[in-house]
Image (spheres, grey):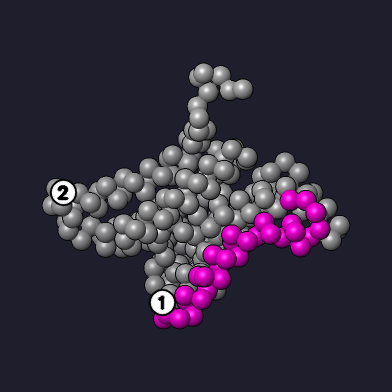
């Protein structure tokens, strides 16, 4: 039975709080700018221009071997700036819920590592596997990395025949199907490519970080 000082809900890992604050602070700045308290009214557009990942510029830089540090830095800044307040809300919900789960299982620094690896992998995939010149911004690619890590944890714990264990991929599968369906119905940028690679890199990162994670997956595949 929990003691009188035991919290009813486990606290969020510090790394999750820091990532969440990164989103909140930028949104607070944008809200203040739009209320004419500071900055300019088009603060959101200015921040997107300043912090978003630029696929065409990065691809051109790589092809000419002229490395611009700013283009690499944008791989880590684009997840914190969003196209709308609602987009930031949805991304924050993913960070808080999935980051808490992953942090409790793999540790707080694992959340940060998965966030960084997923964000960078998603940006690289978006630059080299699409022909889009639309900038990449928003927290969904690394959020999908946390979904990938969440999926690994569920899959590593799943029992029974392989078809039953594959149910661990339901959340990721449903979200990706929805993303691809919307992309096919609309003429917007192929952001689903970045999100897919974010999820894949999150799954692989969690598998490597988790003690014996690679062995767990190998054993599952052998038994199948």
The reply to whether callout 1 and callout 2 are in contact (CB within 8 Å) is: no
Q: Residue at x 55, y 60 (%)?
A: 198
Does residue 188 show up magenta in the picture? no
- At label 1, counting other C-alpha atoms closer than 10 Å, the crowd grade (few under 14, some 14-19, many 20 or more) is few
Q: Is residue 215 left or right of residue 94?
A: right
Q: Main secondary structure of the magenta part?
A: helix
Image vertical order of residue 40 relative to residue 192, above or below: above
Q: Is residue 123 left or right of residue 169?
A: left
* Residue with the most extreme top position: 4
Res 46 → quadrant: bottom left
Res 134 → quadrant: bottom left
Q: Residue at x 46, y 59 (%)?
A: 140
* Residue with the most extreme right position: 223
Mark closest to the chain's N terminus, 1 or 2: 2
Helix, strand, or loop for circle 1? loop
Q: Is residue 167 left or right of residue 52?
A: right
Q: Which residue does the numbered mark 2 point to in the structure image? A: 38
Residue 40 position, x and y percent, is: 17, 56
- At label 2, counting other C-alpha atoms closer than 10 Å, the crowd grade (few under 14, some 14-19, many 20 or more) is few
Image vertical order of residue 59 relative to residue 187, above or below: above
Helix, strand, or loop for circle 2? loop
Residue 75 position, x and y percent, is: 45, 57
Q: In this picture, which residue range is highlighted in magenta? A: 158-187
Q: Residue at x 15, y 52 (%)?
A: 35
Q: Quadrant of the C terminus?
A: bottom right
Q: Which residue does the numbered mark 1 point to in the structure image? A: 188
Label 1 to label 2: alpha-carbon separation: 32 Å
Mark closer to the observer (1, 2): 1
* Residue with the most extreme left position: 36
Asked whether the viewer can see residue 121, the reply is no
Asked whether the viewer can see residue 22, the reply is yes
């Amino acid at each position: 039975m929990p003691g009188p000082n035991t919290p009813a809900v486990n606290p969020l890992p510090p790394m999750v709080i820091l990532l969440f604050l990164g989103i909140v602070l930028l949104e607070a700045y944008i809200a203040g700018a739009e209320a004419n308290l500071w900055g300019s009214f088009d603060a959101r557009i200015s921040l997107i221009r300043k912090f978003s990942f630029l696929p065409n510029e990065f691809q051109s830089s790589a092809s000419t071997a002229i490395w611009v540090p700013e283009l690499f830095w944008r791989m880590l800044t684009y997840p914190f700036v969003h196209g709308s307040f609602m987009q930031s809300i949805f991304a924050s919900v993913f960070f808080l819920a999935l980051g808490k789960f992953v942090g409790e299982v793999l540790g707080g620094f694992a959340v940060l590592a998965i966030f960084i690896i997923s964000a960078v992998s998603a940006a690289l995939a978006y630059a080299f596997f699409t022909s889009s010149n639309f900038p990449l911004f928003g927290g969904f690619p690394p959020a999908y990395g946390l979904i990938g890590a969440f999926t690994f944890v569920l899959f590593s714990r799943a029992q029974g025949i392989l078809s039953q264990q594959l149910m661990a991929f339901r959340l990721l599968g449903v979200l990706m199907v929805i993303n691809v369906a919307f992309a096919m119905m609309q003429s917007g940028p192929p952001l689903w490519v970045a999100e897919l690679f974010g999820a894949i890199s999150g799954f692989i990162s969690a598998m490597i970080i988790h003690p014996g994670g690679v062995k767990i997956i190998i054993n599952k595949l052998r038994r199948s």
